[in-house]
Every structure is written in C-alpha cells, then in structure tokens.
Image (cartoon, rainbow, N blue to C red):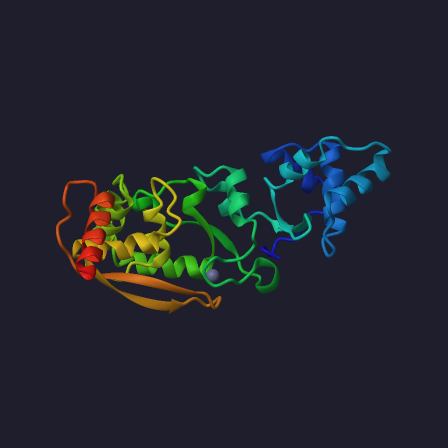
Amino acid sequence: MTDARPLPSPYSDELVTALKRRSRASLAHQHIYACLYEWRHNPPTDKEISDYVAAITGVRNSQLQRRRRDLKEVFFIENLKGHRYHLVGWLPEELAEATGISNRVRFHVLQSGACKNCGRTVREDGVKLAVDHILPQAWGGSDAEENLQPLCVDCNAGKKDYYGEFDQYGQQIQQAATYDEPHRRIAMLLKAFDGGLVPSELLGAVASMKQYQEDWQKRTRELRELGIDYQTKKRKLPSGRIVTDYALTRWVPLPDEPLAPLIRRLEREKKSDGLS
Ligand SMILES: [Zn+2]
C-alpha cells in the first residue's frame, strides 16, 4: 500500500465524495472501481473489467478505458505487464496537489511503480514515490515529461541534499541548459559545477534539453578535442545499475563558432596527422 489510509469500499459515500472532488462519480465509474477493488490481489485486464461490469449492468461499457483513467485522478493504479490494472492505494495527496504537472503526465511518470534511483517499488517495498524534476525547477528545469522521473522519498531527499551544495551555481547551471548546441550545454554545465561531480542523470538531461541526445556521453568525450578535460567516477546505484558522474579538470574558453563542425575538423586533422 502506498498509504496507510485504507481504500474506500465500493459504492461507499467515501468513494463517491473522493471521485466527485477530482473527476466524475457515475455509477459506471463505481462499477469499474468495484472490479479493481475486488480484484486488487489479482489485477484484471480491461476485458475482465468489461466482463465484470457487463455482468452487473447487462450492457458493454463503451467508455470503459476513459472511465478507468478517470479513477487514476484519485487512486494510484499501477499498469502491470499484460495490461493488468492494479489498484494500489490512494494517490498521495502531495502528488494529487502538485502544481504544473498534469495528472496524465504524473501517472505516466509514476507508472513503473519503481524508484528510478534505487529501484525499490511501491508494491514490494512499500516506498512512496514522488515526481522528481531531473533538472530542478530552481535551475530552470521544466515540467515536460522528459525532465521528470519517479523517485522514492528517500532518494528524493538525498538528491536535494547533494544538489543543495551547488545552489550557489544555480544561475550558471540554469544558463548552461539554455545554449542551442549540445556540446556547449554539456561544457557549460561541467564548468558551472566548478570541478564538482555532475551526476550522470543531470548531464544527460541538460545535454538533451533542446533536442534529444542519443549519445550524450560521446558528445562529452568530443569536448576533449577542444582541450577541455574531465574525470569520471563510477557510482553504483542501490538498484545495481552503474552510472558515471563527471567532474571538470581542465577548462578552455569555448570559441564562438559552431562547435560540432569544429570538432569534426579537429578530429579529421588529428587522423591525417596520424597517417602522415
Ligand atoms: Zn529510491
């Protein structure tokens, strides 16, 4: 359970009141809830929900999927393998009330039910998940889904502590994320951290700020052509995944010309030097 608060019984006043507050509370919504509730230890598919509702009403519910999604405004319904819908618990109030992020996006982000950092899950470990901004809002991070990830409350607090050390560079970090070229965004972010370790996820997010970077690690390595250098440090996440953090060790001012063609040229020159 995500929350100590027990789920309301099907067709109860508590359920109707909660549904009315955030979405709709038609009888059809309540039938779907009743199915999810009764089957919460053996989560049903849409087909099974449809069969369940039809057995009560005698008709097929044509709006079933939309109504099931309506319930997600109030309850945390996990999307399991095989399109099974698991009614986990109440949606934590802080998530329901979070500003800026639409419910659709929030649910999408939380859908895995697992913390992106430590891998612990709502179901097996009973953690509470929060929607985390990869690039914090205070540093210019947006509410776009690409900038959001599920973190458990512990990991979220740990991240806040670590990032807090760099708050004095907040303005430079924010600035770094605004450049048009990925190489420049990466370089300026490394510089903004002033030799401090830049977490892998943050570097990846800032690299992809304007356009998704399939291989931001390669973009980072290419900065060495310009005379910039850094060291890396591997870090094992509690989930077992290994990530690499980056710290700037040598800075050279970036030329004003476009960096990608310049890097290509420098690479070519180096190669032909090697051949001659
Ligand atoms: Zn975690």
Q: Position of residue 135 (x, y in %)?
A: 35, 48
Q: Which quadrant, please, contains the C terminus? A: bottom left
Q: Is residue 59 left or right of residue 222?
A: right
Identify the residue shown where x is 67% and y is 39%.
Answer: 68
175 lies left or right of 143 = left
Which quarter of the rendered picture does the N terminus lie within?
bottom right
What residue is shown at x 57% (from left), y 58% (from top)?
A: 122
Question: Does residue 208 appear to the left or right of 60 in the view shown?
Answer: left
Q: Tell me if I can see residue 97 in this picture.
A: yes
Return the x and y of residue 37 as percentages of the image width and height. 73, 49
**154 is higher (above) or lower (below) than 135:** below
Question: 228 or 75, which lies in front?
Answer: 228
Residue 32: give x, y in percent of width and height.
73, 40
Q: Is residue 168 in view from this perspective?
A: no
Which quarter of the figure has residue 144?
top left
Task: State the residue in front, 54 or 215.
Answer: 215
Figure check: 20 above or below 167: above
- Classify residue 14 as left or right of residue 242: right
Residue 160 position, x and y percent, is 35, 56
The residue shown at (77%, 42%) is 47
Frontmost residue, 130 versus 216:
216
Total numbered badges shown on the rendered structure: 0
